[in-house]
Image (cartoon, coloured by chain):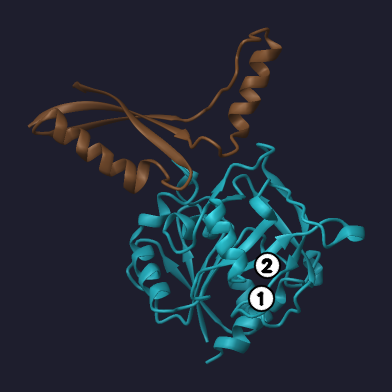
Chain colours: A brown, B cyan
Amino acid sequence: MSRFRIAVHITPRRGILDPQGKTVADALHTLGFSTVRDVHVGRHVIVEVDAGTADSATALTREMCEKLLANPVTEDYEIASVEGA
Amino acid sequence: MRFGIVTFPGSNCDYDAYQAVVETIGEEAVYLWHKDHDLKQSDVIILPGGFSYGDYLRAGAIARFSPVMQDVIAFAKRGGPVLAICNGFQIACEAGLLPGALLRNASLKYICEFVRIRVESNDTTFTNRYAVGDIMRVPIAHGDGRYTADDETLNRLEGDGRVVFRYAGGPADADEWWSPNGAMRAIAGIVNETGNVLGMMPHPERAVDSLLGSDDGLRVFESMLARIGV
């Protein structure tokens, strides 16, 4: 068993109204970042888990996303990185 | 008839629900602790409002896995009546008892005020004492009440007559859809396919006496008594 540190990005699904992202985009425009086209605000979750291999740690994290970390109705998730911890 | 009211860490409308049951329709109410696997032989379960588990991760996401919820889910799947109010509605969606999800209000603001809702269906366990089109004045108090589902789900809900309450406009245009939180199709409350689980963001239990500003929610409890009364 080794310990892995896995980072997960969870974002509102495309097409679903994201008022927080829109508000941040508006603020960026106000600050002069006129080329900003879209902003989405989500969550960044770091899970440390003991597993035999990086693949099994990733598979386990996917299962956590499906069951709890992300809401399959409104959110998408992406495993951003897997590192030995 | 016994109402079981679940108390999660962070529930804050459990006592309101208790009072609504005991003082207005004179039935028995018991509290159900979130860590117990014991529904105390309740005839109806109420999932009350509040901020279970601090709304961590997503409103209702953690409560859905608490021990008592496994029994509530089994109870609901057997056809047992469940009234899920506010945070309870969020928990019921997370638990898959109801379709869709409740997202952050479109205004990004917590809203605490009386609103008007329209009864869209009275062919339910929870609304049989109302007439379709009745306008109720009831409070809402939530930060995450924007009902969201895909078009297919919304069409099915409407087609099956499962949209029970919609937010209604001001006095002059009570039939107009208007949503304080950005809910899709102004949906304020829905029932599941078998009609035994009602989820609603407004608080009928806080509108059971004119001293509270309105008694328009009273008939939700009277409806349950009329339909389930044992």
Where is residue B144 shown, x and y percent of the image? 59, 46
Quarter occupied by residue A70:
top left
Number of numbered markers: 2
Q: Closest to the observer: B1 or B160?
A: B160
Q: Hey, what amino acid is under mark 1?
A: Val
- Residue B13 in view of the camera: no
Where is residue B155 shown, x and y percent of the image? 59, 60
- Tell me the element at label 1: helix
Q: Is residue A81 above or below residue A68?
A: above
- Residue B143 is labelled as none
- Tell me the element at label 2: helix
The chain that hosts pointer 2 is: B
Q: Is residue B39 above or below residue B145?
A: below
Residue located at (49% from left, 45% from top): B55
Where is residue A84 shown, x and y percent of the image? 17, 21
Residue located at (51% from left, 69% from top): B192
Residue located at (34% from left, 65% from top): B70
Q: Which residue is mark 1?
A: B220
Q: CA distance from mark 1 to mark 2?
A: 7 Å
Q: Hey, what amino acid is under mark 2?
A: Pro
The answer to the question of whether label 1 and label 2 lie on touching residues, with beta carbons closer than 8 A, is: yes
Residue placed farthest to the bottom in the image? B230
Q: Is residue B99 above or below residue B221?
A: above
Residue placed farthest to the top in the image? A32
The disc, 1 or 2, on the residue closer to the chain's N-terminal end is: 2
Q: Closest to the observer: A45 or B211?
A: A45
Q: Which residue is mark 2?
A: B204
Q: Is residue B78 above or below residue A60?
A: below
